[in-house]
Amino acid sequence: MKLTLPPLSLYIHIPWCVQKCPYCDFNSHGQRGEIPEQEYVQHLLADLLQDLTHFRESIQQRPLHSIFIGGGTPSLFSAQGIEFLLQQIQQVIPFSEDIEITLEANPGTVEAERFKGFAKAGVTRISMGVQSFDNEKLRVLGRIHDSQEAKSAVGFARSLMENKTPHNLTSFNIDLMHGLPNQTVEQALDDLKQAILLEPPHLSWYQLTIEPNTLFASRPPKLPDDDDLWDIFEQGHQLLTMAGYIQYETSAYAKPGYQCKHNLNYWRFGDYLAIGCGAHGKLSFENGKIIRYSKTKHPRGYMRGEYLYEQKEVTIADRPFEFFMNRFRLLEAVPKMEFECLTGLPLSAIRQDIDWAVGQKYLLETDRTWQITEHGKLFLNTLLERFLVD
C-alpha cells in the first residue's frame, strides 16, 4: 500500500490566557504572574526539532502550507517572541510561497495594539475570539473585552489588511457564538448583524455546547431550546448568504477566496505537525502508515522537555471513518480519488456503505465525487456511524 503525501501544516499551541472561560474545554491555563515566553519558545523549537527527526520519513521535503498558532491566548506573547519563533521554524523547515500564518487573539485593547507587530513578524491572518457584541453576554461567558473593544480590534485588523505594505494581513476572522445562556433569537441575530456590518473576510459562527470538565458543566446555565436554535441557524444562515458569505464548513463562512487554508487542510485529511502543550498532530507515510500523536498537556511536564505524550497508528479499519469524519464537515464535493490516495484503500472497501448512504439520500454520487446533501447534513452522525468499525 502506498499513500500520496498531502499538504503539510503546523499547529502551535500556547496554553496561557488571562482567565479561563466557563465554557472552555481547550488546554488553557489562567495566567499567574509573568508568562515564561522565552523559555517556552525554546521548548517549542526543541519539540519541533525532535519531530523533524522522529518523523523524517513522513515530512521529507514538504514545505509548510500553513501555520496556526492557537491557545490559550497566543496574543499574550510579544510580537518579538512570535517573530523569533517563526524565523527559527523557517530555518529548519521551508515555508511555501503563499503560506498562511494565523494567530488567535483576544480582541481587547492591549492585544489589538500588538496586531501591527504580529503582522511585521510574519503573521498573515488574525483570528479574534469576539463571541458576542452584547456586554451582558460577554460577562456571562467570562470574556475580558467589551463590545466596543471588539469593534476597535476589528478596525485595527482591517486597517492592517488595507495597508499595502510588505507587512500587512491578508485576512482576519471573527469567532462568534450563538445559543448563549438565556439568549433570544433576536439577540443572537443582532450579534450576527453587528458582525456582518464589520465585514470580516471570514466568520466562524458556532453554537455554544456544554463540554465536560468546564464550569458550565458543573453549573449548567439555561440555554435556548431546540426550536429557537433552529430558528437562529436558519435565519442566521440566510443573513450571511445575503451578505455574500459562503458556508464552506459546518461552522465557517467566508467571502469568496478567504477560506482558512489551515482548516481546509485539516478537514481534507491533510497532514499537520503539532508542537506545544497538548497539541495534536497527524502524519502520513509513503509506505502506507498514518499516525496520530499528541504532546504533554501540562506546561510543567512539557517544560521539563517531556514533549511526546502519545503516538498511535490509524488502523486500516478506522481509516474510512477518520477520512469521512473530516471530509463531511466540508460542504464541497469529495473526489473519490482523494479517498484512495490518502487512505490507501480501494473504493470497493466502502462500496456497501456508500450505496446505503446514497439510498438514504445522505449522499449524491457521480463518477468522480461524493457530495453530502442538505438531508445528509441533518443526519451527519448517523451517516458517519455507518463507517465506524463494530
Image (tube, rainbow, N blue to C red):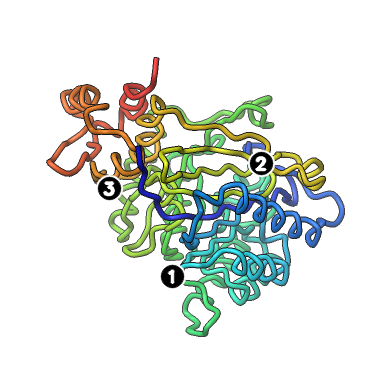
Q: Is residue 70 visible?
A: no
Task: Tell me the kind of residue under disc 1.
Answer: Asp
Which quadrant of the view contains residue 218?
A: top right
Task: Tell me the kind of residue under disc 3.
Answer: Glu
Q: CA distance from mark 1 to mark 3?
A: 22 Å
Which quadrant of the view contains residue 250?
A: top left
Image vertical order of residue 100 relative to residue 236, above or below: below
Q: CA distance from mark 3 to mark 2?
A: 32 Å
Q: Is residue 135 left or right of residue 244?
A: right
Task: Provide the secondary structure element on which disc 2 rests.
Answer: strand
Q: CA distance from mark 2 to mark 1?
A: 28 Å
Q: Along the polypeptide, which appears first: circle 2 or circle 1?
A: 1
Q: Residues within 10 Å of mark 3 (few under 14, many from 20)?
A: some
Quarter that holds the C terminus? top left
- Counting from the top left corner in percent of width and height, residue 358 is at 17, 28
Q: Is residue 351 left or right of residue 224?
A: left
Q: Which mark is residue 295?
A: 2
- The residue depicted at 47 percent of the width and 79 percent of the height is 162
Task: Tell me the kind of residue under disc 2.
Answer: Lys
Q: What residue is disc 3 on?
A: 332
Q: What residue is disc 1 on?
A: 98
Q: Along the polypeptide, which appears first: circle 3 or circle 2?
A: 2
Task: Provide the secondary structure element on which disc 1 rests.
Answer: strand
Q: Which mark is residue 310?
A: none
- Counting from the top left corner in percent of width and height, residue 98 is at 44, 70
